[in-house]
Amino acid sequence: MRADPDPPVLTAQARSAIIRDSLAVGLATGTYGVSFGAVSVAAGLSIAQTCALSLVMFTGASQFAFIGVLAAGGAPLSGAFTALLLGTRNTLYGLRLAPLLAWSGWRRAAAAHLLIDESTAMSVTRPSTAAARVGFLTTGLSIFVLWNLATLGGAVAGAAMGDPRTYGLDAAVGAAFLALLWPRLDNVRSRLVAILAAAVALGMVPLSPAGVPVLAAGGVALLAGVLWRTSDAQAAR
Amino acid sequence: MIWTAVLLAGVGCYLLKLAGLSVPAHVLERPVVERVADLIPVALLAALVAVQVVGRGHDLVLDARAAALGVAVLLLLVRAPFLVVVFGAALVAALLRLF
């Protein structure tokens, strides 16, 4: 278990380092909501529906998948199914984070809404519950606020706002995911899983609906975890 | 119909998140579950990087995003701060598209 006895306090220095990094992720990810807002309206959703997706669903890949299916002429319910399929990723994140964040009751119910790729990545590698909570909340809340504001802005401005790709923001998202992945690549097993997962995802892109490739890549983790039984001590961080 | 789907999927996605956080702790105490749970973010993040960078619809394309990712790798290797990595990559992509 990672939830070892916590250090007595989270030093002010460590705390502000986590907050700074988390806000950087929040800024990079949140502003990308502009593209979601614009694309969603272009896909035929109203501004209110677009904002409802960011407020209630609040998990970017699922949101993009939802409007992607609608834009391609798919039925709203198949859009919903695709979004839910992608959302199962967050269940797995939660499984990993639950003992580390160690929340219960209404706090857990509230925190669950912020459980997304970025808040997971910014908390799961922390050495203590205190540090993990700072990373989780700072990342989750800053993205929630910015993502929703950016969604509204993007939806209202629509195509007039221009393509966010002009500013390289689409490339920034890939870089952010890589920077989040980087510290986890410190052992052979993780590196192999990362390479295989990327290969599986790319192999699936031409064959499957948007979002499925990433889910399929999760199967690599499942297989590797079940089959690779050799000494955990060796492979552990 | 769209509203129904928006709300169904939205509430559903929230419940999927809550379910993950609510699984009893002892479930994680099995080594297999722990190994899998540990590797899942690695696999999904790697897949997200790949799909974000070279995926476009159902096609795979190498464009400014790939160059930006290369720059991100270099920045990570020299231990640049997160913000520098992310916006450095964005800047490279934006500049490449200008020319």
Image (cartoon, coloured by chain):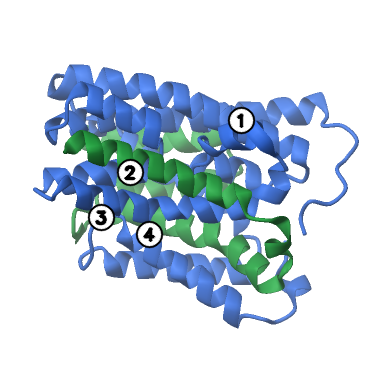
Chain colours: A blue, B green
Tell me the residue at 13%/36% (across/down). A43
Three-letter code for the amino acid on which mark 4 is drawn: Val
Is the C-beta separation of discs 1 and 4 under 8 Å? no
On the image, numbered disc 1 is attached to which residue?
A137
How far apart, in angstroms, are the residues tagged by discs 1 and 4? 25 Å
Foreground mark, 2 or 3, reads 2
* Image location of residue A195, percent across then percent down: 46, 68
Disc with the residue nearer the chain's start (1 vs 3)? 1
How far apart, in angstroms, are the residues tagged by discs 1 and 3? 29 Å
Tell me the residue at 54%/44% (across/down). B18
A24 vs A187: above or below: above
Disc sitting over residue A214 in the figure: 4
Badge 1 density bin: few <14, some 14–19, many ≥20, Cα 10 Å: many
Q: Quadrant of residue A171?
A: top left
Q: Quadrant of residue A208?
A: bottom left
Badge 3 density bin: few <14, some 14–19, many ≥20, Cα 10 Å: many
On the image, numbered disc 2 is attached to which residue?
B9
On the image, numbered disc 3 is attached to which residue?
A210
Using the rendered image, report if marks 2 and 3 lie on a common chain. no
Per the image, label 1 sits on a secondary structure element best described as helix
